[in-house]
Image: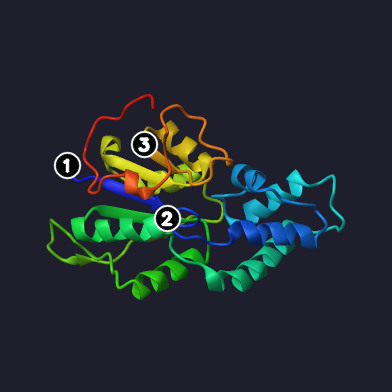
Amino acid sequence: MQTLLLVDLDGTLIDTPHYEAWRNAARQIGAGELTHEEYLVNIAGRPRLEGASRLLELKKDGLAVDISSNELAEIKQAEFLRLSVDARLFDDALRLLKRIEISQQCVKFYTASQNAADLFRAMLHKADLSLEQRNSVQSNIVQINIVQQGRDQTREALFLELIKDQDLSAVTLIDDSPHSVDVACHLGIRAYQIHRNELLPVSTDPRARIIRSFDDISIPILDTPIVDTI
């Protein structure tokens, strides 16, 4: 059975400045300091407008201005665009992508960001990677598959959209967000959390695999039974 690999873009493959943009936006509205842990637990892996709403709820007792979630989302977006000129692929992510291309591992990428897909394509072009894959049934070339989470779409709904009719035992997911990994484990997906900073939170689901580097994952992914515990 062909296995399917699902990989998040923001913070997982791409060292994007979403945390820094949200932190700066919080400062601009007088909401105080947004810690990295607060960001990962409350905002990471969620669409921008939902992230803005959650930030306002989190910091509601310290706000210096009356601002809507739409206005805060616009401030964050402006900060992100200003900072994203320095965005890059993590070194181990680049090695993973090269292994995916060589092995022809079936892969789908996903993101809640409206900016990440274009950034990712530009980075692949710079690295001379196409990630084009040959369809084993129709023998045609399939372009890179990047799915953006809908504005009101939950992570669970996104993952089910990505999986479609694929057997869960043949699906593997990689994400840096503990929330996303928890959702994947709840659905019965084999899930890895890439955890580069030991001070940051990890998934609370005992079925989650916690890894420090993509180098810890063998490519192609083999179709093996899901293990219930780490």
Residue at image position (34%, 71%) is 127
- Disc 1 on helix, strand or loop? loop
Can you give x and y, in whole percent of width and height, for residue 71 in the image? 74, 63
Position of 116 with respect to 128 (left or right) is right
Say which of 81 and 91 sits in front: 91
For marks 2 and 3, give the CA distance.
Answer: 15 Å
Q: Looking at the rendered structure, which numbered label has been put on residue 1?
A: 1
Q: Which residue is mark 2?
A: 110
Q: Which residue is mark 3?
A: 189
> Amino acid type of disc 3?
Ile
- Mark 3 surroundings within 10 Å by alpha-carbon count, few (fewer than 14), some (14 through 19), many (20 or more): many
For marks 1 and 2, give the CA distance.
Answer: 22 Å
Confirm or deny contact between disc 2 and disc 3 (CB under 8 A).
Answer: no
Position of 169 with respect to 88 (left or right) is left
Position of 175 with respect to 53 (left or right) is left
- Counting residues from the start of the chain, the first of labels 3 and 1 encountered is 1
- Is residue 85 positioned above or below 169 on the image? below
> Which quarter of the image is occupied by the N terminus?
top left
- Is residue 26 positioned above or below 178 on the image? below
For marks 3 and 1, give the CA distance.
Answer: 16 Å
Can you give x and y, in whole percent of width and height, for residue 137 in the image? 13, 56
- Counting residues from the start of the chain, the first of labels 1 and 2 encountered is 1
- Disc 3 on helix, strand or loop? loop
> Amino acid type of disc 1?
Met
> Which quarter of the image is occupied by the C terminus?
top left
- Counting residues from the start of the chain, the first of labels 2 and 3 encountered is 2
- Mark 1 surroundings within 10 Å by alpha-carbon count, few (fewer than 14), some (14 through 19), many (20 or more): few
